[in-house]
Image (cartoon, helix red, strand yellow):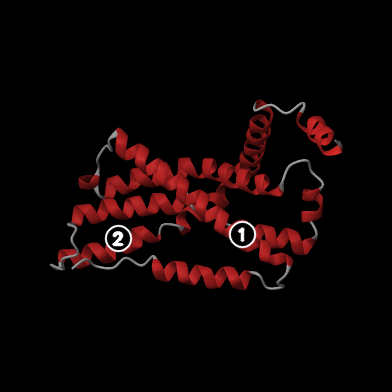
């Protein structure tokens, strides 16, 4: 009986609109906060431009007659897609969570009526919103350099890419957040994430097709 009364009292004022309003407010707060560091966001966007550097290497090898199953134009568009996927799936929750735990800031988070998970998730989403204008400018510059690669994706392609990138972001975030939990038991939990990251890089290296 006590348990039933507890849940009745807890969820009596609960509506779908309330958590949506809370999460929307968190996103707008973090967006406004990150907009104060626009120069840093630009540097982070540029630091993720490695696919553009690799584009020059791979397209050069294609131009020398090496057959990878894709022509030069397909390679250019492929690396543009890789750049976009990397920009919208960057995760840093592991370092933030470990820092908050070591510095004692997590204790204040736990006193809030919302799980710290949502703070970190909305912070990442807010950061994506601040990245978007700079990414758009880089795409324009990219098509100026490679005008032959310009194309307008179909609605199905755009929808499929959006779903795939969002699912990748959620999976990447959950993996990082799960690893960050080890900070409660391991002093150097960052080493665990580094081991996973090297494995991730090794398995993500593209291989030429036969």
Position of residue 192 relative to residue 43, above or below, is below
Q: Nearer the viewer, residue 53 or 68?
A: 68
How many dots with numbers? 2
Q: Residue 168, position in %: x, y?
A: 46, 51
Q: Nearer the viewer, residue 15 or 104?
A: 15
Q: Residue 205, position in %: x, y?
A: 36, 67
Q: Nearer the viewer, residue 182 or 35?
A: 182
Query: Which residue sits at x=24%, y=67%?
Result: 208
Look at the numbered disc 2 and give the secondary structure of its residue. Answer: helix
Cα separation between marks 1 and 2: 33 Å
Label 2 sits on residue: 55
Residue 90 in view (yes/no): no
Position of residue 34 relative to residue 208, above or below, is above
Residue 178, numbered circle: 1
Q: Nearer the viewer, mark 1 or mark 2?
A: 1
Residue 161, numbered circle: none
Q: Residue furthest front?
A: 1
Position of residue 117 relative to residue 129, above or below, is below
Q: Residue 48, position in %: x, y?
A: 45, 57
Look at the numbered disc 1 and give the secondary structure of its residue. Answer: helix
The N terminus lies in quadrant: top right
Query: Which residue sits at x=39%, y=47%?
Result: 138
The C terminus lies in quadrant: bottom left
On screen, residue 5 versus residue 134, left or right, reads right
Q: Residue 87, position in %: x, y?
A: 45, 51
Q: Residue furthest left?
A: 65
Query: Which residue sits at x=41%, y=57%?
Result: 49
């Amino acid at each position: 009986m006590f348990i039933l009364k507890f849940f009745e009292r807890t969820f009596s004022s609960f509506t779908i609109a309330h958590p949506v309003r809370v999460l929307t407010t968190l996103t707008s707060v973090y967006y406004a906060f990150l907009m104060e560091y626009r120069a840093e966001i630009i540097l982070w966007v540029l630091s993720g431009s490695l696919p553009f550097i690799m584009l020059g290497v791979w397209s050069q090898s294609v131009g020398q007659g090496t057959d990878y199953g894709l022509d030069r134009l397909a390679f250019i568009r492929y690396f543009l897609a890789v750049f976009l996927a990397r920009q919208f799936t960057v995760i840093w929750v592991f370092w933030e969570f470990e820092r908050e735990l070591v510095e004692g800031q997590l204790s204040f988070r736990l006193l809030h009526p919302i799980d710290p998970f949502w703070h970190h998730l909305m912070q990442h989403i807010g950061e994506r919103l601040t990245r978007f204008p700079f990414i758009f400018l880089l795409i324009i510059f990219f098509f100026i350099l490679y005008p032959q690669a310009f194309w307008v994706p179909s609605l199905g392609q755009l929808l499929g890419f959006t779903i795939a990138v969002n699912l990748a972001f959620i999976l990447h975030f959950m993996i990082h957040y799960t690893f960050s939990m080890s900070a409660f038991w391991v002093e150097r939990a960052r080493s665990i994430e580094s081991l996973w990251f090297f494995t991730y890089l090794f398995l993500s290296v593209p291989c030429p097709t036969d």
